Amino acid sequence: MTRDAATGRTVEQSAGNGPPPGEPLLVAERLTKHFPIMGGFPFQRKVGAVQAVDGIDLAVHAGESFGLVGESGCGKSTTGRLLTRLLEPTAGRISYRGQDITHADRKALAPIRSEIQMIFQDPYSSLNPRQTVGAIISGPMEINRIRPPGGREARVRELLETVGLSPEHYNRFPHEFSGGQRQRIGVARALALDPRLIVADEPVSALDVSIQAQVINLLQRLRAELGIAFVFIAHDLAVVRHFSQRVAVMYLGKIVEVGDRESIYVRPRHPYTHALLSAVPDATEFLAEGAGASHVDAGYAGAGEGAGGGPAPGPGRIRLAGDVPSPIRPPSGCRFRTRCWKARDRCASEEPPLAPIPGNGPGHLTACHFPEDPTTARGEAVILDPALRGGGVAKAHGVEG
Amino acid sequence: MVAGELVGRSPRQLMWRRFRRDRAGVVAALVVLFFFAVALLAPVISWLYGKDAYTTYGLDRPELLDPVSGYPMKPNGGIDGEFWFGIEPKLGRDVLMQLVYGIRTSLLIGLAATVLSTITGIVIGVAAGYLGGRTDYFLGRLIDLLLSFPQQLFFVAFMPVVTALFVSPEKETPTYLRVTALVLVLWLLGWMQLARLLRGQVLSLREREFIEAARVTGASPWRIIRRELLPNLGTPILVQSTLMLPMFVTAEAGLSFLGVGVVEPTPDWGRMFAKGAEFYEGDITYMFFPGVAMVVFVVAFNLLGDSVRDAMDPKTTR
Ligand SMILES: Nc1ncnc2c1ncn2[C@@H]1O[C@H](COP(=O)(O)OP(=O)(O)OP(=O)(O)O)[C@@H](O)[C@H]1O
Ligand code: SF4
Ligand SMILES: [Mg+2]
């Protein structure tokens, strides 16, 4: 499989760390999305807002894979939908290859539509049950009036092969496929327009663990062979580790730490990144073991129990207390302070900027007043869950750490 | 994956297969088809049977009716080899032909009202669900308002109003105008259920990711409605309109029964009940055939609607 000569695109950035050179493909500045909460009778009016995404900055370079990680509800999908302009930003700016697309309408976006595509989280709701696989994958070409040499049907069959399905599946309907196969159909649809950038919104989290690695490997291959840039959204750090050169960690609508793979996984500074990493002590083994990604779904909340079966040597556990605060009334100052073990008065009054802090490598930004040491080794367990603090349980875990 | 025989079947084909296995549904469908065939082939039936719906056989041939009471001379409403369903008291018209042509009139009106209401329901329901916001709010209130009307009463009240729009009250109203007015009144108050149902369906479909997938490739709203939404609304539309048709037919019969629908001499199913009520003490047979036909018709349609609904397996509709 080679890239069309017509597009003339090459793999500009295949692997390696550090901020990639050249002009970025997609840039978001102070990107914000507040969903109004309507209420009142008889006339509805705005009574509040869900601050789903609150002023994030990011840049994705050609051929690069950018990971976006955070727990459920922190605004990852909203960010993805803003980047693909499925949602209208409340504030901020998005530009694609220098062109401002923040408020571009459907007509103005038309030329860019084929370059930014999306893969969705739920393989069941992302395919129209009434359309054949052929219709689903050729739809984007029809809409954009693309006539590939050899015809659309031939191109669809080719795409089916590319994503590891049989060309014979052309006339089948989605209900005949398994979750993993459906996700491959979704990938083929995203590829139909020959995009430069794909926003993949938790493309594997709805799949069986044994299937996750297969789909990730497929995406990995596409990125390497076709030079497509990815914004890869995931809810834990393990999944993106082998996929993304740069990773941003999101918490409650904000990016709290961003850096290359090395910085995030080996020298993280933000307490929240530490907590996330501690949840997947065997993140390094993901994909290395192929299908052995059984800890991917454990999530950090249950990580203590998850790892309990096979105590990880070295780093102590971090258990966060309570729930994520509501994005309707986020905490003042640092949004993580209600769950942070290092929080002090300053954290409540002053919002830490996302900035390079002393000790960070190039391109590694952290939003924290009192960052952790740049290491994942941890002498003692941090247990903030009140249910576990004190008593035998905490001690037991303390010993483990 | 799936058993070999099911490979490559569309959800519609699967539905059809399930439907064919449902015996009650198939029988109901055949009965419904039979009624439509009768309505469609009324002139042919008339020609084969050798009678029509207008000739007053009883007046032309005095031996058929009792000159004093006006009831048929023969027992059972005058049923014999010549008049299969008997003859009408007083005027002596053929009951079978009256019923056949009556079904034709009522089904025609019901069908026209169903088609118009279905189209209106689709347009308004999809518009409200897809556009949302203010449009949805106002269309929703309009639906609430119209649904709050006591339907039968308003049918009766509106009929003269609508008729008066076309002809001045002093003049004789032509039959086609009465029929048009009936269709309009039934339509006006008949589309809301479907619209409300579809609005809800569209609201939930709109959140599905395949709609976003279409938008992200640049699909126009029109294409999304046509290619992504409507194919997924086929089943509720089908089910709802199979329930709508008998509702309209009975409503039309009701109006004609009350004297605001189709008037003499045009044959009408509902008006036969009015006549039957007049005669039933002396001749119950006249009421019998239209009554049984109506019951069979309504039951068959409802069974058909249920079977269509059952045929959509949750596996293929999600
Ligand atoms: N259309 C919407 N209207 C109102 N609130 C919304 C809307 N979409 C998302 N939200 C809210 O915005 C916040 C962020 O949602 P988002 O879907 O972006 O989270 P997420 O990080 O993708 O979570 P998940 O891992 O569960 O997919 C949530 O609190 C959610 O309830
Ligand atoms: S700024 Fe304060 S509260 Fe926020 S993460 Fe850093 S130490 Fe914790
Ligand atoms: Mg999400």
Image (spheres, coloured by chain):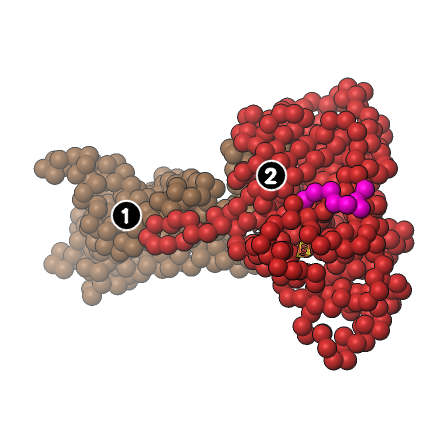
* Foreground tag (2 vs 1): 2
B117 to A19, vertically: above or below: below
Chain in brown colour: B
Say left or right for B214 vs A217.
left
Say left or right for B31 vs A135.
left
Query: Which residue is rendered at x = 53% and y = 46% of the image?
Result: A34
Q: Name the chain under label 1.
A: B
Query: Which residue is rendered at x = 62% and y = 25% of the image?
Result: A99
- Per the rendering, the colour in which chain A appears is red
| Res. B302 image quadrant | bottom left
Q: Which mark is residue A306?
A: none
Instruction: Give the x, y percent position of residue B72.
Output: 22, 57
Query: Which residue is rendered at x = 79% and y = 24% of the image?
Result: A9
Residue receiving disc 2 = A30
Q: Amino acid at mark 1?
A: Asp
Give the SS element for disc 2: strand
Residue receiving disc 1 = B268
Q: Amino acid at mark 2?
A: Arg
Give the SS element for disc 1: loop
Q: Is residue B77 visible?
A: yes
Query: Label 1 neighbourhood size at 10 Å, few (<14), some (14-19), many (20+)?
Result: many
Q: Is residue A302 one of those drawn in magenta?
A: no
Instruction: Give the x, y percent position of residue A270.
Output: 73, 52
Q: Name the chain under label 2.
A: A
Q: Which range of residues does the magenta coloring cover?
A: A354-361
Looking at the image, do the residues carrying marks 2 and 1 touch, with CB atoms under 8 Å apart?
A: no
Majority secondary structure of the magenta segment?
A: loop
Q: Is residue B110 visible?
A: no
- Closest to the observer, B119 or A75: A75
Query: Which residue is rendered at x = 81% and y = 52% of the image?
Result: A374
A72 to B206, vertically: above or below: below
Say left or right for B245 vs A159.
left
